[in-house]
Image: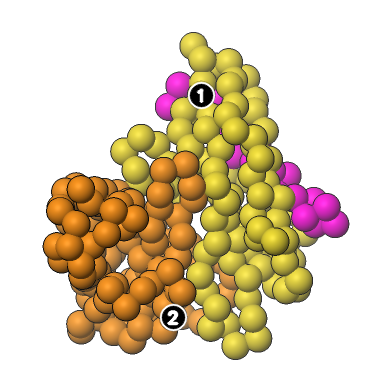
Amino acid sequence: AQKITQTQPGMFVQEKEAVTLDCTYDTSDPSYGLFWYKQPSSGEMIFLIYQGSYDQQNATEGRYSLNFQKARKSANLVISASQLGDSAMYFCAMREMDLTGANSKLTFGKGITLSVRP
Amino acid sequence: DTGVSQDPRHKITKRGQNVTFRCDPISEHNRLYWYRQTLGQGPEFLTYFQNEAQLEKSRLLSNRFSAERPKGSFSTLEIQRTEQGDSAMYLCASSIQGGVSPNEKLFFGSGTQLSVL
């Protein structure tokens, strides 16, 4: 089974409106972290927001917020007041923690393309 | 802090040739990762170092691939006898991590785009 699922092939949003990018995950570890990264056409992966599995509140970072629904295993990214510069690929990722902490790799989904229309 | 630097940005090579990529992490970062990304996919983990020790390698990393991080600073990724299937973006990332936690944040470079003809 895929660890991270991003099924939206491409999303369009009007400038200044809000948009939600979906992400579901699969893990049996009690401790894990969820991340969203942005990848513009330049190629660099830019960290946006982090949510820990034990965090009680949904994470927020400026215009980015994470709608974390643990029982549904979903971690959707909400971008408010979209800007033209938000046009990019967006990746959801997860780090699972085993008992030794040795498994530190970040596992990424396939990504979602977001296009912001003026 | 200049960020993670990767060199070269682009590499075109003929099948069967060897290639080497370099990654300079953010100074003081003790962990360094290599990922591979093909078109339309998310990055896939290849290997990572903590200081100079290579702690994990993916099954994706065939014996034609080797990575080093001498002295725990910059890292090199070498691909021997390149194949067309090796064409991809190779991303390097670094982090500073003192213990065991899921919130380790990776800082990525802009990648090296490899095209094997």
**Residue B16 picture location, percent across and down:** 17, 62
Which residue lies at the image location 35% right of the left edge and 46% below the top edge?
A44
Image quadrant where residue A60 sits: top right
* Residue A95, visible in the rendered structure: yes
For the N terminus of chain B, give its image quadrant. bottom left
Image mark for residue A115 = 1
Say if labels 2 and 1 share a chain: no
Chain A shade? yellow
Say which amino acid is labelled 1: Ser
Image mark for residue B33 = none
**Residue B20 picture location, percent across and down:** 17, 65
Question: How far apart in space, not on screen, are marks 2 and 1 (Cα)?
Answer: 36 Å
Badge 1: residue crowd in 10 Å (few <14, some 14–19, many ≥20): many
Which residue lies at the image location 38% right of the left edge and 72% below the top edge?
B61
Image side of residue B38 versus residue B114, left or right:
right
Image quadrant where residue B82 sits: bottom left
Q: Are marks 2 and 1 in contact (CB under 8 Å)?
A: no
Which residue lies at the image location 39% right of the left edge and 61% below the top edge?
B35
Which residue lies at the image location 29% right of the left edge and 72% below the top edge?
B65
Secondary element at tag 2: strand
Chain for colour orange? B
**Residue marked by disc 2:** B56
- Whether B44 is among the magenta residues is no
Seen in the picture, residue A103 relative to A59 is either above or below; the reply is: below
Front residue of B31/B18: it is B18
Say which amino acid is labelled 2: Glu
Secondary element at tag 1: strand
- Which segment is the magenta one? A63-85
